[in-house]
Image (cartoon, rainbow, N blue to C red):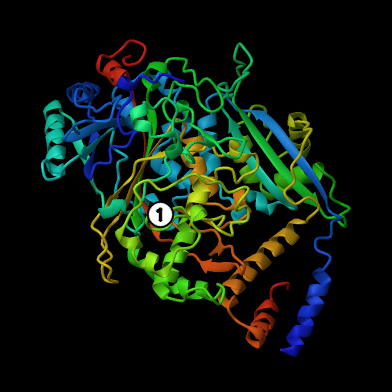
Amino acid sequence: VSSIGAALRQTLRSHSDGFGGQAVSHVVVTLTPIRAGHASLLGRKLRGLRGGHSSPLAHLRYVQFGRWMVIDQLKTDWPGTPRPNPELKSEYLLFSAVVTVPADDRDYTFPDSFWEDVRTLIPCVADVVWGHCMGYPGTAGPADFKRYFADSRLRTGIHHFGYEGAEVDDIRRALQVRDRFVAFALDHQHDLGADLKAAYLRESAGWFS
Amino acid sequence: MVQLDLADIQGNILVGYGFPAGRHQFFHVPTAEAGRRFLSRILEEVTVQNAQPWTKKPRVAANVALTYAGLEALGVQDAVLAQLPAAFREPTRQRAERVLGDRARNAPCHWDLDASESHILVLLAVSDITETKPDEAAENVRGIASACGVEPGPCQPVQALPNRREHFGWADGFGQPAVEGVPPGHRGRRRARAGQGVPEPNGITWRDLKAGEFVLGYPDEDGPGTLGGPAAPLLRNGSYLVYRKLYQDVPGFHRLLREQARRYGATLPAEAPRDIDHLCEVLAAKLAGRWRDGVAVPLRERRRVEDTKRLADSASRNPDNNFRYAALDPHGRICPIGAHIRRTNPRDALVGGGALSRRHRIIRRGMPYGAQWDGSEQDSADRGLIFVCFNADIERQFEFVQTQWVNDGNAFGLGDDRDVFAGLDGGSPKLVIQGDVPFLMKRDQVVFTRGCEYLLMPGIDALRDIVATRPGLVGP
């Protein structure tokens, strides 16, 4: 137990500063017009994608959060809606992602590296999704691909970062620690003194590894 | 004060019948003509919202609701259908899995109430089962349908339990929204309604919710609720009905409660009673936010052991609902933040006072199904709740409550903790009971989805318009 305790103290010390706080968070938002008659099919395909850790976006480096949304109509039932009601020229696909780049990855340049990851790491998903949008060039040509998303990018004035400055791996580890801590608390909340300490040393050794 | 067109609003939306039993009969419409013929036959039997309480209750109250597929089958025009909300248009089985989280053990493949091929739901409520047998009432409607060429689908029996109980043992149905425009004879006194509407910023008084939150075509909490476009005649004085069949694992719940009550007792002060039955009642009250007789925990934190022994045999007739959370119990020390009634109606507990709660209220009209549990481990018969609720916007009201407040704890700072009763598979394995020593309770799912449908309960004029194939509403 004592050797585990020493290792644990060492691990705790190494994590005592929390997240590095040096990573830089970026946001990317694109709006692309959907080809006529394709919105419903696209919606079905998006619904078929997995979420969470199984999401195709999880294959991309440094993506904290990302989502696609089909904008098929404007809400016009709220007070102060402009008159006459504005109408969309087409349906649109909105894509947004938060990307947090570690400070030590100097080769990653945002957003070019992000789009290159999309093109090379999840090309099939990119083609299946944006293939329903007007003017989408496909993943074969890097220059056209990059230009398409540069042209489609929306400038945003306000961003919300769930965990600004925290690297994705840090967040994953933190969530694992939380889950393990909850399990520990459920099992040992009534243990006292030496029993609690022994259980803690036994079970917490792996929390931070 | 808004004037509601009561004669056009179906009964049981604004004021519950409180009848002891009923049958929910689904129907399939093979042709639009057959469906309209059937509607025309039962239209005169439909119960509307009466202006005064009944002096003599009807033997049977009947109400009609239509699925989206039902509107299509009845010949409602595409331009009207296109104006209906996406949540209603999407096939419910698909939406339940995708949006509500009815996956794994709650997935549609496990449902035993499959109304996906059904178009019309007739809800029958019987006021006196010694006079009228619910099955006879259902048979009568099926006979009318058969004569019109309409095919019967599933028929779901419902039956109240003694003392207004649901199967886990709570007296249920309290704390319904107080709605503006409901006739005075149905409303009760202002004091009795306190706590059921919207908490006003003065910290003391409450006002009634706008009727447009529940009945379409009236001002709601944020706007005039004006209906426009081709769907207006279909929607006016109607309400969206959410229908869910929820199986309750009653022995499993009591097993969980008993097992966890012993552990919970260890977190209580030394002077707290240690009687296990009493601890079960205290923990149950903390989980629900109400004692089993309906008394709200925020208003009565402690009960004596002698009191808790009697909770199973009594129901408060009209328990006081006049309580808030923000000032007196912000951290859930009295009523836990994750308690069922606090999640489903946080009142003033969220940022902005009542502003976030008032747009997410629902009117509940559910009833139990299945026989009462006999108290033995062996009795795992099919029993549960037919959850029925009314709202004007399924996505903003029912679905929001179910997905954001019940099936997620994020809004309350509870991470992925889920409601002990209505929370589904997944999420964190714990519930937190705040106290001097917080208690972390293991959570097992004890309520399982066994069916779900979204329907529209139209106004009487809308039903007449469908029958009469009103131009612009029905037809090519």
Q: Is residue A114 left or right of residue A183?
A: right
Kind of element beneath mark 1:
helix
Picture coordinates of residue B423, whole percent (x, y): 47, 54
Q: Between B21 and B231, which is closer to the camera in this rendering?
A: B21
Q: Is residue B281 left or right of residue A41?
A: left
Q: Between B88 and A36, which is closer to the camera in this rendering?
A: B88
Image height check: is B297 above or below A99? below
Residue B433 visible to an observer of this rendering: yes
**Which residue is labeled 1 in the image?**
B106
Task: Tell how many labels.
Answer: 1
The kind of residue tagged 1 is: Asn
Residue B14 visible to an observer of this rendering: no
Q: Between B272 and A92, which is closer to the camera in this rendering?
A: B272
Residue at 22% x, 29% y is B30
Image height check: is B139 above or below B386? above
Q: In this view, does B209 lie to the left or right of B368?
A: right
**Chain of the residue displaying label 1:** B
Mark 1 neighbour density, 10 Å: few (under 14) some (14–19) many (20 or more):
many
Identify the residue at the far bottom of this view: A2
Give the quarter of the image for residue B177: top left
Image height check: is A44 above or below A102? above
Q: Where, quadrant-wise, is the C terminus of chain B in this rendering?
A: top left
Give the quarter of the image for residue B305: bottom left
Picture coordinates of residue B400, whole percent (x, y): 52, 41
Q: Between A60 and B209, which is closer to the camera in this rendering?
A: B209
Q: Is residue B301 left or right of residue B62?
A: right
Picture coordinates of residue A2, whole percent (x, y): 75, 89
